[in-house]
Image (spheres, grey):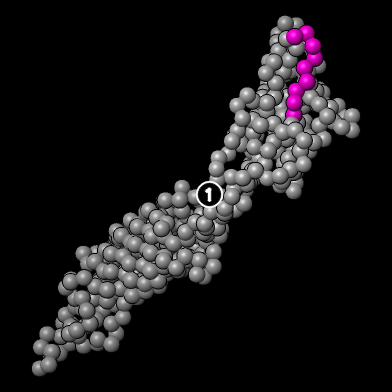
Amino acid sequence: MRGYVVWLTLSTAVGLAQLCQDCPLPCHDRVADTAVYVLLHDRVRIEQCRSIVRTFLADGSTQAVRIQFLRGNVCRDTVVPITSILEAGTVGLGLDGQPRIIPILPVREYERRHRPPDPSARFVELCGIGGVAGKDTSIRRIGSAELFPAVEAIIAPFGTLLGKRWSLGILAAASSDGERWRIPLGGHLRYWFAPQGELERTASYRPDSCTFNDAMPYIPGDDYRERATAYQRTDPSAAYVVDYQEQSSGWQPFLFAEVGTLLNTDFPGAGSEPSLNPDEYQQWFLGGGVGTTAWHWLTLSIAYRYQRLNVRTPCALCPPSSALPDNYVVNTARVHAVMLKIGLHIRY
């Protein structure tokens, strides 16, 4: 029983130690890894250090380290400027029989020589649509089917003309209306929840935040220039790099509204002539919805659309005349539809 308790205690301690180690200790002497201390210039000594990670102070630019350490069986951490560290070392003896001092040094700082151009906010979307409409309540049953397909293209060539959260586009589609096909044409106004076409200044450690005292020096490349610092000694195996990256992560939710007219294809009853009431022939649509882009190339949205559709049908109750021996009348269907759009989002 005592052996089981000892094993359980050791297993718990090992588990806590693993949870308390975002990075391996900057020490190649693995025997001494479990007994490392950090001594600060104000003589504060932090024992039982389990991890040292490069980070920044709250100003986002001052180099610092986050030290994870154990107090009993509790993992704690603290963030200190890297220049506040006097030394770090092993409590026990190293392979040479002497205590080992571990260098914890700042790194060189680089910045991109030229700010890259802002990403384009212009886009084209090509979508397939599945729609669900309400029941046909028109007098002569000329409304659309309850389920209908459509394809749609949106081009937004104006970029950030209305601001970095707005896009204005032109919509063109082919939409089924039962056995009839119509062509919606109109405008598409979109509001993005995050700015588009914008780069964000970033700072990070490269190759990562865990690299200390590596034998291979890190060189960012010709696109970057080194910034002057007051550090007397630096660790060449890593670098603090100021760069720019697109603010968008690829998932960009948006709201949209659209309005326009509907053109007809060549189906029976298309157009307003000949009919007894051509002035009542008006076709248009109005809608809106919510959506998102994903991984920069996929677009998903759900929309509501109100459509006013017309079809001419023979008027059996209308008396014939010499001008119109076969009388026709314009019928109107008011369609409420919910549509799911899935397609490609292409910036250009």
Which quarter of the picture shows residue 64?
Answer: top right
What secondary structure is marked by label 1? loop
- Relative side of 91 to 18, left or right: right
Which quarter of the picture shows residue 157?
Answer: bottom left
Q: Residue at x 87, y 32 (%)?
A: 41
* Count of all numbered marks drawn on residues in the image: 1
Residue closest to the eye, 146 or 296 = 296
For the question of whether residue 12 can be seen, the reply is no
Q: Is residue 230 above or below residue 193?
A: above
Q: Residue at x 61, y 45 (%)?
A: 225
Badge 1 crowding class, 10 Å Cα cut-off, few under 14, some 14 to 19, many 20 or more, is: few
Q: Quadrant of the C terminus?
A: bottom left
Outermost residue to the right: 43
Read off the magenta span. 96-104
**x then y, percent, for residue 286:** 40, 72
For the question of whether residue 310 can be seen, the reply is yes
**x then y, percent, for residue 1:** 73, 6
Q: Residue at x 29, y 85 (%)?
A: 280
In the rendered structure, which amino acid carries the disc numbered 1? Ser
- Relative side of 107 to 97, left or right: left
Which quarter of the picture shows residue 219?
Answer: top right
Q: Is residue 79 magenta?
A: no
* Residue under pointer 1: 249
Residue closest to the eye, 303 or 330 = 303
Outermost residue to the bottom: 322
**x then y, percent, for residue 240:** 66, 40
Residue closest to the eye, 312 or 27 = 27
Q: Residue at x 10, y 93 (%)?
A: 322
**x then y, percent, for residue 296:** 45, 50
Q: Is residue 154 above or below residue 45?
A: below
